[in-house]
Image: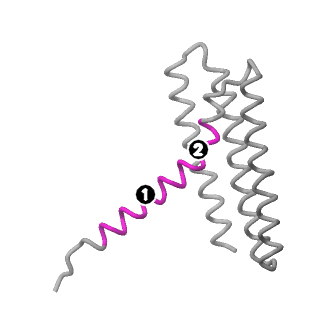
Amino acid sequence: MQNHRALLKAVTLRSLMLSAVFAIIFLILFRSGAPPYLLGLVFGSFLGILNFRQLGATIEKAVAMPPAKAQSYVTVHYFIRFSLVAVAILVSILSEQIQVLGTVAGLLTVKLVIYMTQLLSASSKSMNISKRKEE
């Protein structure tokens, strides 16, 4: 349980840091037209982090259920999260104040953080394996 909460906190913090990097990139690239991209980034990042936390809560509850009930529970919650992402992208497409690119970048921050974390931990493990044992 402690490890689960620590992971949620670490991914959330790293996602916010990556969102800040994206914000700087948007400010550099789009200068005066950056506010819609930044608003989309905030919107997408918030939804991405919320989605990740909801996934954690869903898994935590599903583990305690019988397999058949857990499968239907997880499936329903998957479609709820999927629908929320679809609505967010649709809102950003239809709104003039929110830019789609910013929303998609925000939604992808959590995934990018997880991929980068796994890639870095895998490379550090391979470095430890490839070291020659001292005699």
Q: Which residue is mark 2?
A: 109
Name the residue furthest top: 32
**Among numbered discs 2 and 1, the one appearing first in the sequence:** 2
At 82% from the left and 58% from the top, the residue drawn is: 76
Q: Residues within 10 Å of mark 1 (few under 14, many from 20)?
A: few
At 81% from the left and 80% from the top, the residue drawn is: 66
Q: The disc labelled 1 sits on which kind of residue? A: Leu
In the rendered structure, does residue 87 fall within the stretch colored magenta?
no
Q: Quadrant of the N terminus?
A: bottom right
Name the residue furthest bottom: 135
Camera-side residue of 119 and 5? 119
Camera-side residue of 67 and 12? 67
Camera-side residue of 78 and 2? 78
Disc 2 to disc 1, C-alpha distance? 15 Å
At 54% from the left and 34% from the top, the residue drawn is: 22
Q: Residues within 10 Å of mark 2 (few under 14, many from 20)?
A: many
At 30% from the left and 74% from the top, the residue drawn is: 129
Say the numbered circle drawn on residue 119: 1
Asked if residue 22 lies left or right of residue 47, the reply is: left
Callout 2 secondary element: helix
- Above or below, 17 against 98 in this view is below
Q: The disc labelled 2 sits on which kind of residue? A: Thr
Q: Main secondary structure of the magenta part?
A: helix
In the rendered structure, does residue 120 fall within the stretch colored magenta?
yes
What's drawn in magenta, residue-wise? 105-128
Task: Write down the quadrant of residue 69 in the picture.
Answer: bottom right
